[in-house]
Image: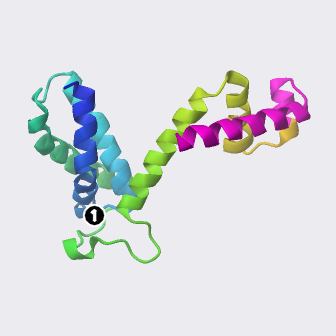
Amino acid sequence: MDPIEALTDLIRQHRGMLVHAARREGLSAEDAVECAQEALSTFLQLLQRKEVPAEAAAWAPYLTTVTKNAARNRRRRHHVAVPHDAIESLDAPSGEASAEDLLAQAEEHVRLRACVERLCGTQRSVVMLRLLEERAGEDVAAVLGITRGHVDVLLHRAKASLRECMTE
């Protein structure tokens, strides 16, 4: 099996466990999701440098250790140290999104970014300026050297392409 495929399978199987491990270190659900992603990135670097075993069956303990270390470092680095919560109280409070919801949002965000990257250059620029930077249509037209009407047309087409891409 390809190492990337093996890692993808491992992430799908253990992402909840990684977020839970970060939560046990005292992070909020949102910080725990970011921490799990950071840990996966670090793990990939370790894998490339051959500092972890090549067989995927042995990866879970390494991934858990990297996640716990990342959570501790995040707490120290961001001065968000809070007392450890009991495992039973790790469920999200009524106003806070759960870790699973945040993971789903993160996955959706990654898919959307990939769809934006698939747009042609001008459409991508219009989407970035108009939607992500929230600039006025006239400003976008001036920056790109096109008419305001053309910005609207490009944005309409880009949105249609993004809807199609996201439903694939």
Residue 113 horizontal/vertical position (percent): 54, 37
Which residue is more in the foreground, 100 or 144? 100
Q: Is residue 86 visible?
A: no
- Identify the residue position indicated by label 1 in the image: 26
Q: Main secondary structure of the magenta part?
A: helix
Look at the picture and state if 88 lies above or below 72: below
What residue sits 33% from the left and 55% below the top?
32
Q: Is residue 85 visible?
A: yes
Q: Secondary structure at mark 1?
A: loop
In the rendered structure, the answer to whether residue 2 lies left or right of residue 102 reads left
What residue sits 11% from the left and 44% below the top?
61
Residue 19 horizontal/vertical position (percent): 28, 55
Residue 69 horizontal/vertical position (percent): 21, 47
What residue sits 13% from the left and 27% below the top?
51
Which residue is more in the foreground, 66 or 17? 17
Look at the picture and state if 88 lies above or below 161: below
Q: Amino acid at mark 1?
A: Gly
User: The N terminus lies in which quarter of the figure?
Assistant: top left
Question: Start and end of the magenta stretch?
Answer: 139-168
Look at the picture and state if 97 lies above or below 14: below
Look at the picture and state if 119 lies above or below 97: above
Per the image, is 11 magenta?
A: no
Mark 1 is surrounded, within 10 Å at the Cα level, by few (under 14), some (14 to 19) or many (20 or more) other residues, namely many
Residue 156 horizontal/vertical position (percent): 77, 39
Which residue is more in the foreground, 165 or 31? 165
Which residue is more in the foreground, 33 or 154? 154
